[in-house]
Amino acid sequence: MNVLIVGSGGREHALAYSVAKSDKVDKIYCAPGNAGIAELAELVPIDSMEFEKLADFAQEKEIGLTIIGMDAPLVGGIVDVFEKRGLRVFGPRKNAAILEGSKVFSKNLMKKYQIPTAAYENFDSAEAALAYLETSNYPIVLKADGLALGKGALICNTKEEAKDGIKTLMLDKQFGSAGDKIVIEEFLIGREVSVLCYCDGTTILPMTSAQDHKRAKDNDEGLNTGGMGTFSPSPFYTKEVDAFCRKYIYQPSMDAMKAEGRDFVGIMFVGLILTKEGPKVLEYNARFGDPETQVVLPRMKNDIITVMEACIDGTLDKIDLQFEENACVCVVLASEGYPLEYEKGKVITGFENFKNKDGYYVFHAGTKKTEEGIVTNGGRVLGVTAKGSDLKQARKNAYAATEWISFENKYMRHDIGKAIDEAVDGIASN
Ligand code: AMP
Ligand code: GLY
């Protein structure tokens, strides 16, 4: 079959890589894609928000499955447009993607169905939110209701910071209408874990765990980013934690969406925090994570097309998800300055070092092919990824491979997976 992937990041490159391994696939297209994806797929110059044009393309090229990588088209209803045309598409419909599209919706859902999460209040006026600050404890967390490129959560240590935060979100509208409403929630302490789950509306199958590193600088300092690196599996996500989450979080989330008439088909990404009182949900996303996908999919043994078709057909209960007994680490190479201002157009060299190296991957994010060669074209440029027999080995391999790539203004964190040492050395509570 022909497959169309919608998106242009490292996540979509990792998806393309997995799709290319499937015996069921003849040709891959990617809209709009990037320079790395171009090696596996034909790039299609259609924007991810042009749903009708994408559906026209899918009809014309007889696409058997379209996979939506990004949040904005899902929240905007791309799946509904494709389904109306009788096209097979992997991802939740608009009425289910709201699980990511509105924090107010997801918090209210968790409250209604008693899914563990931080205590919270919703606000649709800055006045009421400011008044609430007078009686709050600190730190406190403010969250824009809508999509904000992963940057809409503000952790405020003092009342003054929280006042500034409310101004930023609700009055200055830094994230536009995403800040019309906000959630103010309790600050939780614990290890964060991301679990991406396949869903068919009834059955939910969690994949192996991963941990992201959201802050720009080492030791979790600096601004929040889309993610600076990941590792999988998380040693903190023990069998006991997994059993708890399946019983009290994953299946109840799935059932809650069904009960609301919003059957969730696609990937439910559950962002967890492992607190002293047990795991709680920090957020849901309605799609694969970036850069979680880069460390999870290379370890998955199943044919990805078979699993995605089972989600669409409602037969996920027949699938036995299997992962390799190893580990994977992804270190993001970014442009110096990200997530604020940075320069683009720097020539990148060293890709040939990854040729024929089993277990090493260089997933492209912000790259572009020009006459000069492949150049930087975004904040997060590449996700250098490596497997290893265990997490320590995978981290060693990934950091060694970061040296194979050169470009001006190359920036990375040097402590991706540092938490692993604590787990291995026995400091962690598990
Ligand atoms: P979110 O967009 O909701 O995932 O939030 C982004 C990041 O902010 C999370 O990955 C956490 O690091 C942090 N965060 C969000 N909510 C809380 C919370 N209630 N307590 C502590 N940290 C949080
Ligand atoms: N890595 C976090 C996300 O994809 O939202």
Image (cartoon, helix red, strand yellow):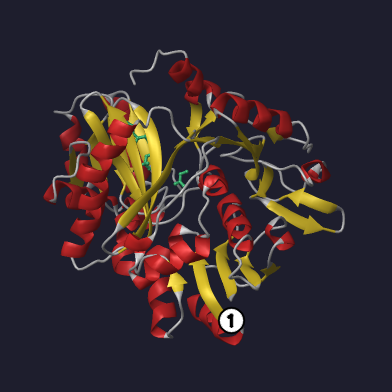
Residue at 46% in and 16% down: 422
Residue at 16% in and 29% down: 134
Q: Is residue 162 left or right of residue 311?
A: left
Residue at 73% in and 56% down: 368
From this view, report whether residue 168 is shown above or below residue 49. above
Quarter of the picture for ligand 1? top left
Q: Toward which corner of the image does residue 160 lie, by quadrant? A: top left
Near-viewer residue (161 or 63): 63
Residue 179: give x, y in percent of width and height.
33, 50
Residue at 60% in and 58% down: 8
Say if disc 1 is inside 8 Å of ligand 2.
no
Label 1 sits on residue: 57
Residue 76 visible in the current orientation:
no
Q: How many marks?
A: 1
Near-viewer residue (417 or 126): 417
From this view, report whether residue 64 is shown above or below residue 309. below
Q: Secondary structure at mark 1?
A: helix
Residue 65 visible in the current orientation:
yes
Residue 341: give x, y in percent of width and height.
62, 41
Residue 173: give x, y in percent of width and height.
38, 50
Q: Dot 1, how many residues are within 10 Å of its Cα: few (below 14), some (14-19), or many (20+)?
A: some
Q: Toward which corner of the image does residue 95 lie, by quadrant? A: bottom left
Q: Amino acid at mark 1?
A: Phe
Residue 353: give x, y in percent of width and height.
81, 41
